[in-house]
Image: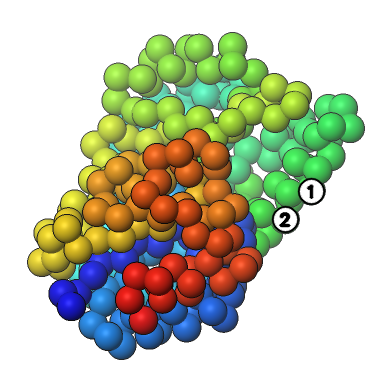
Amino acid sequence: MNPTLIFLDIDGTLTEPGSNTPPASALEAVRRARSRGHKVALCSGRNYGMLSPLLQYGFDAVIASAGGYIEYGGKLVYDCPMTSAQQKLALETFARSGVFRTVESRDGSYTDEAFKAFLARSQGENSELLRWRTQLEANLNIRPMAEYQGEPIYKIVFMSPSEAALEEPKRLLGGEFDFCIQGADACGIVNGELINKQFNKGTAVRRLCEAAGIPLADTVAFGDSMNDLEMMQTAALAICMGNGSEALKAVADEICPPVGEDGLYKAFAAHGLI
C-alpha cells in the first residue's frame, strides 16, 4: 500500500472544540497509521501557537492559520502573513465598523475585550456564548488586545453584532480576503474568519503533497465544519465527522462517527490505514 497523507482538522475532528486533548482512540489511530508508513498532518484554522500543545502526540506536518503557515518534518514549507498595509486596513476597518476582532500571529492570539463586555450587556440569550468564549480563551491562551505588539497577522477571527456591520469590511477587504462565515446566533451575532485569498486549506493540501512527494490520489481529509470545505474538495477522500455541519456532510464522500465516539479510529480502520 502506498503511503497515504492524512489531513486532520483539530476542533470538532481530532478533539472536542477548544480542547487540546484528543481521545485515546484517536491518538492510537494516528500512532498505528504512522507506524505503517502513512503521514499524518494537522490541518487547522488555529495558529501555530494554539495548536502547538498537540505536537507532543506526534505528527508529520503542521498546517496552521488555515493554510497560511506550513511545516513538514520540522522544516518550513510556506509562510504567508498579511502585509503591513493589509494588516492596518483590516484592523482599522473592523474597529470602525464595530466588529470585534481576534487577531492571530504565528504564536499569539489577541482579542478585543469589548466583545465579552458586549455579550454581558446583551440579553440572556448570549449567556451561553459568553461562557463558551471565556472558556475558549482560557483553553487556547487567547490574550487581551492590549498585549498585542504589532507582530505579523495571519488571520482575523471576527464577531459582528449584525450582518449590516460587515458591509464596509466586505467592500474594503473583499478584493484580497475571503470572509468565511461560520454562522449567526439567535441574537444575530455573526462569527467568521478573514482569510487571505493567497491560501486556504485546499491550497495547503496541494503544497504539502508536493513537499512530501505524495500524490493527491493518496490523500484523505477529515473535517467537521465549512472552514474545512476546500481541504475536503481537494483531497482524494473526504470524510466528515458525525458531529459535523450538515452542509459539509452534503459534500463529503463519507461520514464517520463523531469525535467523541471514536470516529477517527473507526474510519482509519475501515480504510485499512491501521
The residues tagged by marks 1 and 2 sit, at their Cα atoms, a distance apart of: 6 Å
Name the residue tied to disc 2.
135
Label annotation for residue 131: 1
88 over 235 or under it: above or below: above
Query: Is 121 on the left-hand or right-hand side of 140?
Result: right
Pinpoint residue 186: horizontal percent, then vertical percent.
75, 26
* Residue closest to the far right: 124
User: What residue sits 38% from the left and 85% below the top?
Assistant: 32
Please report contact status of discs 1 and 2: CB closer than 8 Å, yes or no.
yes
User: What residue sits 38% from the left and 15% below the top?
Assistant: 172
Give SS at disc 1: helix
Query: Is 198 on the left-hand or right-hand side of 22?
Result: left
Query: Is 116 on the left-hand or right-hand side of 205?
Result: right
Give SS at disc 2: helix
Question: Is residue 194 in sight in this rendering?
Answer: yes
Which quadrant of the figure contains the C terminus? Answer: bottom left
**Label 1 neighbour load within 10 Å: few <14, some 14-19, many 20+:** few
Pinpoint residue 192: horizontal percent, then vertical percent.
52, 34
Residue 124 falls in image quadrant: top right
Query: Is 12 on the left-hand or right-hand side of 47?
Result: right
Amino acid identity at mark 2: Gln
133 over 38 or under it: above or below: above
Pinpoint residue 173: horizontal percent, then vertical percent.
37, 21
Pinpoint residue 244: horizontal percent, then vertical percent.
55, 48
Q: Nearer the viewer, residue 232 or 17?
A: 232
Residue 61 falls in image quadrant: bottom left
36 over 101 or under it: above or below: below
User: What residue sits 44% from the left and 79% below the top?
Assistant: 29
**Label 2 neighbour load within 10 Å: few <14, some 14-19, many 20+:** some
* Residue closest to the far bottom: 35
User: What residue sits 30% from the left and 55% below the top?
Assistant: 237
